[in-house]
Amino acid sequence: MLGVTNIAALPPSDVPEVAFAGRSNVGKSSLLNALTGRKALARTSNTPGRTRELNFFALTEGLRLVDLPGYGYAKVSKTEVSAWTQLLKAYLAGRPNLKRALLLVDSRHGLKPSDLEMMDLFDDAAVVYQIILTKIDKLAASGADAVVATVQKAIQRRPAAHPTIVMTSSEKKHGIAELRADVGALADWDMIRYKPEHEDREPD
């Protein structure tokens, strides 16, 4: 739909939005592609900090997806990081149509200090956020259970944290259908216009 680097360029807040946040290379682009069934809706990259704007995707007439800039990278200037942080704060604080943020966390590494800082931003802005564990296929079952337990404990007293943690693998499609259903439930279905198959036919 568009990329935004200035809060004044945001699209109208008339459609529900679901934002995707996470450390650089956590798998945001891959998850977006898996959820939508598109191979290149969001571009993937091995270069930290590639997403440098708020990228909006019109999923339907009743729902937008928003890819937020990755964080936790080292090869970006402090000036750029500061600018992106201010843009994020402004977006989170002034977006009444933001229904939920999905905070992606690499299951192999768990919550990092930068993830906790992002959670603080969500809590301060009163934006409901849900932890999505990525790359779960890289862990044994016992390791997955352990990281879920650790994350669950970390969010217990977080005021804006959603209690349900979703485990996903974009490569193996684990948890994708579940997450797709959760995201779809946040859409405004009254805004989505259905067009019957016979609508274009000439009347008899």
Image (cartoon, rainbow, N blue to C red):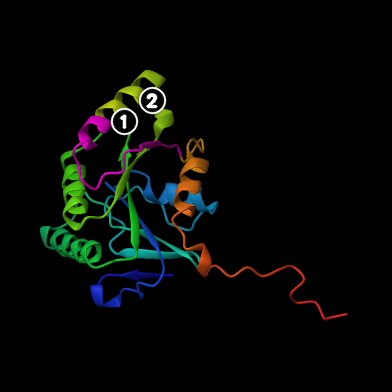
| Disc assigned to residue 108 | 1
- Secondary structure category for the residue under label 2: loop
Tag 1 secondary structure: loop
Q: Residue at x 26, y 32 (%)?
A: 151
- For this view, does 135 lie left or right of residue 155? right
Tell me the residue that label 2 is attached to. Answer: 139
Q: Amino acid at mark 2?
A: Leu
Q: Position of residue 138 (x, y in %)?
A: 40, 28
**Marks 1 and 2, how far apart in space?**
7 Å
Q: Badge 2: few (under 14), some or many (20 or more) residues near its Cα, within 10 Å?
A: few
The quarter of the rendered structure image containing the N terminus is: bottom left
Q: Residue at x 29, y 64 (%)?
A: 53
**Most foreground residue, 58 or 31:** 58
Q: Is residue 174 above or below residue 62?
A: above
Q: Residue at x 32, y 29 (%)?
A: 148
Image height check: is 69 above or below 194?
A: above
Residue 144, how many percent across, how many down? 36, 25
Is there any visible trace of residue 72 in the rendered image?
no
Left or right placement of residue 19 versus residue 35 in this view: left
In this image, 117 relative to 102: left or right? left
What is the magenta segment's predominant secondary structure? Answer: loop
- Dot 1: within a 10 Å radius of its alpha carbon, few (fewer than 14), some, or many (20 or more) residues? some
* Residue type for callout 1: Arg
Contact (CB < 8 A) between labels 1 and 2?
yes
Question: Where does residue 143 sit, x and y in percent of width and height?
Answer: 34, 22
